[in-house]
Amino acid sequence: MNASGVVHVMLTVLFTATAVHGVHRAVAPRRAGWRERGDQLLHAAMAATMAAMPWSHGASLPHPAGTAFFTVAALWFPVTAVHRDHGSRLVALARRLPPATGMAAMAWMEWQTHAMAGLPAPAHHIDALGHTAHLSATARRVTAALALCLLVYALSSLTRVLPGRRTRSAPATDSIDRPEPYGPFWDGSMALGTSIMLLVHH
């Protein structure tokens, strides 16, 4: 197995474990909040899609279903943040931007896969070549921006589970906001894997 195959296997294991964890969290009896269950099911769906993506030549869902699904999923996080009944809405929105970015990255990868598949193989005209080059430059910028945001979030989350960085949180009254001891590990691992997939996929 070459280096690319090893990376694909490692990512598949990571995303599969994350998907199982997300489903487990979504069906846990103590998780009564519909927002929390929705969050975890969306994360599980994203992880399952990412686990299959290396072996399905990029896209795991039919177009435009994949792009539409993850676009709606990206909107879910900021939209549900503004409906919270307590706390600062601005803080709640900021906390939900990282998962929204991950879903947006998925929508971008799905769209890119099908957009590139639809391009004509030989571009015989100068206009076609110029248009393709422009799209490629724009695509690289968008991919780099998404990957950078996810990488920063991944490093921030993963360092929070280090022994010297773990802090005891006060118990929350709402089960939706009750922190999970290893939540930052799963969030950071997912963000890191997504940023890698963005770069490999592109």
Image (spheres, rainbow, N blue to C red):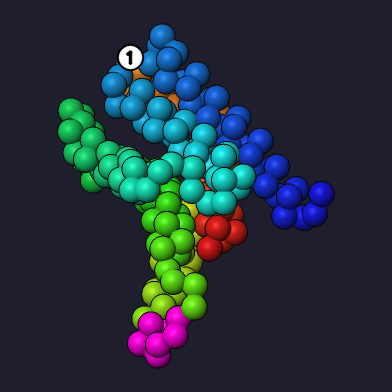
Near-viewer residue (170 or 187) = 187
* Residue 103: image location, x then y, percent: 39, 46
Residue drawn at point x = 27 percent, y = 39 percent:
76
Total numbered labels placed on residues in the image: 1
Q: Amino acid at mark 1?
A: Ala
**Relative to 65, 114 lies left or right:** right
Q: Which residue, given by chain and number where applicable, does mark 1 sit on?
A: 32
Residue drawn at point x = 42 percent, y = 57 percent:
114
Q: Residues within 10 Å of mark 1 (few under 14, many from 20)?
A: some
Near-viewer residue (53 or 106) = 53
**Relative to 174, 140 lies left or right:** right
**Relative to 43, 74 lies left or right:** left
Where are the magenta residues, as a range?
A: 123-129
Near-viewer residue (87 or 106) = 106
Location of residue 158 (image quadrant): top right
* Residue 82: image location, x then y, percent: 19, 39
Location of residue 62 (image quadrant): top left
Which element is circle 1 on? loop
Residue drawn at point x = 57 percent, y = 39 percent:
51
Residue 54 lies within the magenta run:
no
